[in-house]
Every structure is written in structure tokens, then in C-alpha cells.
Image (cartoon, rainbow, N blue to C red):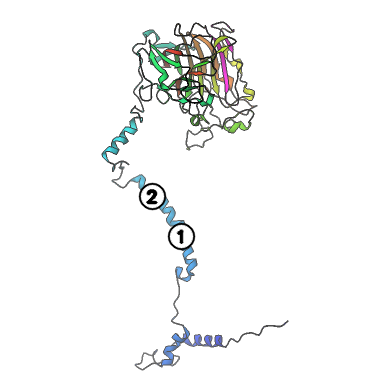
Amino acid sequence: MIQRPKKARTSQLYRNLFLAYHDLPRAARGGECASKKKLKCKESDAGDEERFGIGPREEKRGLSRLKPNTRINAITVLFVIVVLPAVMIGIPIVMLLGTGDKGTKKSPTYNISGMDWYYHELAKNTTSLGQPLVPEVLPVDIDTPSHVKSFTSSVGETWKLVFSDEFNRDGRSFFPGHDKVWEAQELWYWATENLEYLDPEQITTKNGSLVVRLDNEATKPGLNYTSGMITSWNKLCFQGGYLEVNVSFPSPGDAVGYWPAVWTLGNLARPGYGASTDGTWPYSYNTCDEGVLVNQTNRFLSALSGQRLNACVCKGDHPSPGIGRGAPEIDIFEATVHDGYPVLSMSNQVAPFDYHYKSKTEFNTYYNPGKNTPGTTMKNDYVGSVYQQCSSALHYISPSVSGGRKFQTFGIEYRSGPDGYIVWYSDGTPVWRFDARSVGPNPLSKIGQRVVPEEPMVSIRLFASGYVYVYVRSFDLVYMRGAVQM
């Protein structure tokens, strides 16, 4: 193998010898300058440092010992570790403590204009329509008879009337902003594929009744009819108690195709607005398990998107740690025709679902059982679908309760919670009783106890149509009353 000849290192040797010479004291080298004598130094000695690029040696300290790139990296790391956290922690502390006197805080609106201040105060207390966000205590209608201002519950408790509306003043308007309790909606109720468009023009008061009219007239392309829906959403809510209405159904009473209903819904959802019901309806659940997941992990059992506000929240987190929220539904009635007889479906709808939607009906009670006879009640064979589980009874009524000729009273009494109950009434007589134990834990579907709705509930009246055979008809509601335990 041929080796490459090594390069001569004469210049390096000479340089090393010079460094050794340079490190000696000048006096030892014979330099007169070092002895501070007033003699001229040799020019050769003075030029050594310039010619060889070597000056007096200085000891480098701190960051100066690092290369420029390394120095920049070190400064950056120091900034990220020390300066940035100090800023991120310090700014919130300063904002919390304020910049004024100790113990005082400046209003976030201290520097706004007078007009902006007016709208700021208005927004805190009113809606965009000028109505109060938190209305005063809702009144008991002055036309309400004294003998109905208290109610004896099914468990013997006396409850006090807290709100009533007799609808005795004719010509009331329920357009948005016109009434402090009720508001008519303008929309298509697409969730149930109704055949009518809902219009506030279809609702008014006449002859001492609230009238919801269904017309055989299309006001929107693709829809056959026009009707109305009125709600108390975000205005009147209740949690438990007794709710009662007095109604007359469309005429003739045994005609198919109508779907008048009075029902309640958790206030977290707005009736007719699918984005608000998705993940909230009809959940009434406080357990953290598979029941809150999408489809309950079984697409053949459930088509729901999962409980959006579930109990799987750590302590201190938002919202409602350990408490499930939702928009459950209780139907005072949904009117239809069954085997040629007018009948009311009285239901409680829940999620998540039991295996095959089968609840423990042995805990429920059906009063005056029978069928096809006014005043009798039978268990509803419909138990649910991939969208809701339903505990329901069918209550038969007379065809004469229609057209405003005859009215009948219906109501619900309920107590919230995992040990709660719901009782449906017809003319003051119990129709059937739902017990929360009927929707208790179910190991087959891996879910826990569903509860009788604890959410603030709103009241809704809807006159809808699912089929044809409809002409100009009306659905009359004489009064609405509510009582709570005092």
C-alpha cells in the first residue's frame, strides 16, 4: 500500500516557537520596553504581533466562550424556559388584580360611548325584541276561578297554583315579542316531516279560547298546508308539578290526518331547531357508561349521536360535573285515530334505550283498562325506535270533544328524579301512572337508571298534519294552568 507523503510542518513548528517566545516577559527577551526605560523599542519586536495575528491573550467567560450559532440557541432556550412562562403567568395575574387601587376592578365598559353603554345595559336585561330576560313572577290570570288555585296530588300533597292563562281576551297576537309568555313559530317542522308550514298568523284568541288553525292552503313550495305552533321556550319553564289544559279537537272528532298535540320539552332544546335537539333529545340520564356514546355502540339499537352533555365530566370541569343534561319529552297528549276511534297517546320519551326498547311495565299502572270506549285506557304497543324509547298509553275519548262544541281537561302530574313518577289525567281522573323503576338499570344494553325529567321544561302546542283529508279546521285551547308543590 502506498502511503501519501506527510506534509512538512515547518511553519507550524516556527509558530509554536514564537508562541513560547511571546509568552516570556519582555525583560527576559531583552526588550527595553518591558523595563520601562526611555529607549526606543526595536521595530521588529513591535511588529511581531501584527505579522502573526497574535495579541495579548484574554480569558473568555460566560456566553462569549460559545460559538455564535450556539449562543443564539442558548438565548432562545432561555427565553422559552424563563421569559415566556413568566409573561403567560404574569399577565393573567395583573389582569385579575387590576391596575387601579388595590381591591377594586375597572368595569370592562368604562371607556365606551354613551350609546354603547345604553345597548350594553339593554342587552343584559332584555332580548333583541325588548322583552325582559328574566321576567317578573308570572301571574295567575285574574279570570282563574278560586277553587282551582290549589291541587291535591296523587300522593296527597297540596300544591299551589303559580301560573294560569285563561285566554279570555280576544285578538291576542303571538308573533315574536308580542307576548311575555307565548311565542308562535315560523318554520317547517322537518324532523317529523310534517306536511304543513307553521305560521304565526294561524294563532290567535277568539271567543275565550286560544285557536290554532290548520288551512288547506300551501304557503311554501312542497308543503300542502299551513298551521301553527306556540311555545313558552326560554320564557316559562317548570320542574315538576301539575300542568293542565282544556281543549277541543278538530272536527269531526274521528277524522284521520290530524295531529294536534300538547307536550313538554327540556328547555335546552328549541322545538323545531334540529341543531339544538341533536345530542340532547330525549336524554334524561345521569350515568357515565356506554349509554352516552354514539349509537350506544350498537347501530341497530340507536341512531342517536350520543349524549352531548353527559355525566362523564371530571370534578371542576364544565359543564355540570357528574350530572347529565338533555332535553327529555313528556307528551300530555298527541291526538290521533286508532281503529276508527279518536284516541290520545300519552307518553314519556327517554334515552338511552333498553334492549329491544322493553321497559319493566310491571311497575306502571293503567287505570280503567279497555279499548274503543271513551274513558278507557290501554298500553300502547309502540315502544320506540332507533330515535327514542317510549313508555305510552292510549286513552280513548269521545268524538264529540271537537269543533269547539265540547271541551275536556287533560293534565300531567310529575315528580323529577330517579325515584320519580308521572301521572296523566283526563277530566281530573288518573289515566295511567309511569314509575321511574320501569326504566331502571339494564345489563343487556349496559346502561343505568333513566330519570323522570329534572330539566326545566317548556310547554308546546302544535296542530300538525301527517296525511291529507284536511280542510279549514281549528284546535281550541280554553286555558292552561300550572301548579307546584309549596
> What residue is shown with label 2?
91
Q: Is residue 202 left or right of residue 435?
A: left
Image mark count: 2
Alpha carbon separation for disc pair 1 and 2: 19 Å
The residue located at (35%, 23%) in the rendering is 178
- Indicate whether residue 384 is drawn in magenta: yes
Residue 374 belongs to the span the image colors magenta: yes
Query: What residue did someone put label 1 on?
Result: 78
Look at the picture and state if 315 lies above or below 460: below
Q: Is residue 339 left or right of residue 183?
A: right
Position above or below: 450 against 477: below
Q: Which of the marked residues, 1 or 2, is nearer the chain's N terminus?
A: 1
In the rendered image, residue 448, in percent from the top left (x then y), is placed at 58, 27
**Could you tell me which secondary element the residue under label 2 belongs to?**
helix
Residue 257 picture quarter: top right
Span shown in magenta: 370-398
Q: Nearer the viewer, residue 121 or 200?
A: 200
* Image quadrant in which the C terminus is located: top left
* In the depicted structure, whether residue 448 falls above or below residue 368: below
Whether residue 162 is visible to the viewer of this picture, yes or no, is no
Decide whether the magenta segment is chiefly helix, strand or loop. Answer: loop
- Confirm whether residue 83 shows in the render: yes
Question: Where is residue 470 drawn, in percent x and y?
Answer: 51, 15
Q: Amino acid at mark 1?
A: Leu
